[in-house]
Amino acid sequence: MRRCLLLLGVLGSGWLISSTPPKPAAAHFLTLRRNGEAIVADTLSSRFDVTPSAGQVLTLTIVPADSPDDPGLTIMVDEFKPVPAVYRFKEILSGHVREASYRVGEMSAESKACQLNDGEVRITAVDLEHHQLTGTYRAVLCQTNVARSAAKRLVLEGSFTYPYEVR
């Protein structure tokens, strides 16, 4: 009986030593700057979604921490492929939907309202196992809730290593 327990202990400890623990997902972060000023992003309310269709759409929703009930910055990129790539807003003329909107408090702005639509989403790494994207974004938006002469131009930009959901 004692040999049996000893043998089980040796076999059990050998199994534990040889098994490898699952690889943890890389830590995630999300930054947001508006016209160069850092804004803390609410990582609980922010989300990245990818539609599972053939012409996948990547939607980045980045919510400021001081306005968790507002939509914040939303960027839509169609024809998304889960590989490192650059998706430029200028390509909207080619029929691609690549646009951004920003709604926080009384401010409302859209990339389509600007004459120059030069934003981009740059994906530098994709972790398919953990559904995580790494990259940067830059969106130029013009205020839409005021008279054109009083409209402000906003540049929203940041970087991320952030999980995405397929919905």
Image (cartoon, grey):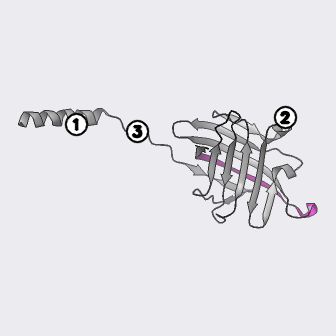
List x then y, in percent, for residue 146.
Answer: 88, 64
Between tags 1 and 2, which lies in front? 2
Label 1 neighbourhood size at 10 Å, few (<14), some (14-19), many (20+)?
A: few
Residue span colored magenta: 148-161
Q: Which residue is mark 3?
A: 22
Q: Nearer the viewer, residue 155 or 129?
A: 129
List x then y, in percent, for residue 70.
Answer: 69, 62
Q: Earlier in the sequence, mark 1 or mark 2?
A: 1
Q: Residue at x 68, y 33 (%)?
A: 54
Helix, strand or loop status at disc 2: helix
Residue 13 circle label: 1
Left/right placement of residue 127 relative to residue 34 reads left
Give the mark count. Answer: 3
Amino acid, disc 3: Pro
Q: Residue at x 65, y 66 (%)?
A: 66
Kindly check if marks 1 and 2 are in contact, taking CB atoms under 8 A apart as contact: no
Residue 94 circle label: 2
Amino acid, disc 2: Ser
